Image (cartoon, rainbow, N blue to C red):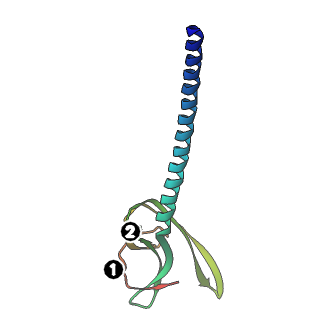
Amino acid sequence: MTEWFSVVVALFALVAAVWATVETRQMKQIERRRDAVSQQESRRRQANEVMAWMSAELGKTGGSTSVIEVHNRSGAPIYDLMVLSSDLIYRDQRRMRVDNPRLTVRIFPPGNLVYGSDAEYSWDLGRRPDECDRLCVR
């Protein structure tokens, strides 16, 4: 009789151990999903705090230069920032679209910077808005 009792107790212990293992794996899986969702939400919140727009820098001689203003108010640096832009120009009374290459910034700290293009359409280093001539939004 005690042998049967020992066998039943051992079977219950085995079932309990298997059940605990399955529950632990399920909890870890749920925890991983929750962490992934939390990380995605954190990235989305930070992305909502980063803005970019086209402006024109008005020179002292009356000409203007296309610039991209980027504002990061997230409080954390942005890594591998990429801004794609296009600009409209007029030639011979025709409206033409000029695609500028990507503005890529490896590390973009919190703040507001203005990026202008040189003659070959590669973006130069960012400047603070107060370092620019007058800016107007396009």
CA gap, disc 2 and disc 1? 12 Å
Percent of width and height locating residue 61: 40, 90
Determine the image quadrant of residue 127.
bottom left
Q: Do the residues labelled 2 and 1 touch (CB within 8 Å)?
A: no
Circle 1 residues within 10 Å: few <14, some 14–19, many ≥20: few
Q: Residue at x 57, y 8 (%)?
A: 3
* The label number, if any, that marks residue 125 in the structure image: 2
- Residue 24, horizontal then vertical, whole percent: 53, 35
> Residue furthest toward the right?
94
Nearer to us in this view, 19 or 33? 19
Looking at the rendered structure, the kind of residue marked 1 is Glu
- From this viewpoint, is residue 103 visible? no
Q: Residue at coordinates 64% horizontally, 79% vertically from top-left?
A: 96
Would you call the spot at circle 2 few (<14 residues within 10 Å), some (14-19), or many (20 or more)? Answer: few
> Picture coordinates of residue 128 (x, y %)?
35, 76
Residue that numbered label 1 is attached to: 131
Secondary-structure class at tag 1: helix
x and y percentages locating residue 121 in the rendered image: 49, 70
Instruction: Report the front residue among 9 and 46.
Output: 9
Left or right: residue 52 versus residue 98 is left
Which one is nearer the viewer's eye here, 108 or 14?
A: 14
Which quarter shows the N terminus?
A: top right
Q: Is residue 57 above or below residue 107?
A: below
Query: Please, what is the three-letter code of the amino acid marked with disc 2?
Result: Leu
